[in-house]
Amino acid sequence: MESRNREKKRKRREMLEKKKAIDESLKAASAHKDHLTAFPSFRQYERNGLSVHLESGCGDKLSSAEKQYILNLLKANMEGPYGSEWPAEEKVKRREMVASEARYIFARELDAPSASASEMSKTNFAESKGSIVGFVHFRFCLEEDVPVLYVYELQLESRVQGKGLGKFLMQLIELIARKNRMGAVVLTVQKANLLAMNFYSSKLRYVVSSISPSRVDPFTGVEKSYEILCKVFDNESKALLQE
């Protein structure tokens, strides 16, 4: 009996220590305002005719122009896939985008076509900001007791799609997740958004998570308009989010 009690206490202590470590990881990751500082080589993207500079942002620090841009691009890209659900979903996204825990990476296209991003980085880029052509909105949170980086939005203007920028941004997101000791990257995709489903599943190797409605309950999940996808980084996260 005494040995069983000791074992219970040991397991409880391990569980509490693990929970504390996860909470500290999430707190530390969320407190960081600019995750690009750890990956300077990702501050610029110069391929396939694009010259783009990346910069970080926070939901509660967005300018009025940035808020309006986000809403306009969301409407342009997502009104179709959401269909009749869009008016209600738009209200949700308005609230989500300005939350203090929301983190952003903005992609800005350089205004001067003759100037490369590397050249611009040698000057005061703040004085020469180009126009935004896309963004990633992400957060650090807990899913099924797994600390994850959750991608709320990856949105690009149509004219810069198909040029590798989306894949580049997701590679950066995965690096940020790993550096901050997250167990996975998780995201939600509308089933009607076939291009996005193919992008994540075929090009980036994301899989439908075990927490997605279609896997939780195939009978009712088929009625849902979305899937939850994930890419896990360790066996424990795989057992909780994928298998």
Image: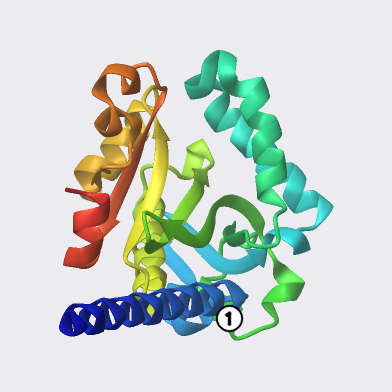
Question: Residue at the top extreme?
Answer: 84
> How many marks overall?
1
Graded by Cα atoms within 10 Å as few (under 14), some (14 to 19) or many (20 or more), the crowding at tag 1 reads few
Q: Could you tell me which residue is drawn at 34 percent across and 63 percent down?
A: 171
Where in the figure is residue 74, as x and y percent of width and height? Answer: 60, 36
Give above or below for 165 relative to 221: below
Task: Identify which residue, 76 or 219, lies in the foreground.
Answer: 219
Task: Identify which residue, 163 or 79, lies in the foreground.
Answer: 79
Which element is circle 1 on?
A: helix
Q: Which residue is mark 1?
A: 121
Q: Which quarter of the figure is the N terminus placed in?
A: bottom left
Residue 115 visible? The answer is: yes
Where in the figure is residue 180, as x and y percent of width and height? Answer: 42, 77
Task: Give left or right: position of 229 versus 96.
Answer: left
Q: Could you tell me which residue is drawn at 66 percent across and 84 percent down?
A: 123
Q: How is the image coloured?
A: rainbow
Where in the figure is residue 52, as x and y percent of width and height? Answer: 52, 62
- What amino acid is at disc 1? Ser
Task: Identify which residue, 40 or 120, lies in the foreground.
Answer: 40
Task: Give left or right: position of 237 versus 31.
Answer: left
Where in the figure is residue 120, as x and y percent of width and height? Answer: 60, 77
Question: Residue at the front extreme?
Answer: 1
Instruction: Tell me where residue 18 sits by quadrant.
Output: bottom left
Instruction: Tell me where residue 199 sits by quadrant.
Output: top left
Task: Give left or right: position of 191 versus 100.
Answer: left
Q: Could you tell me which residue is drawn at 28 percent across and 27 percent down?
A: 217
Q: Could you tell me which residue is drawn at 67 percent across and 21 percent down?
A: 87
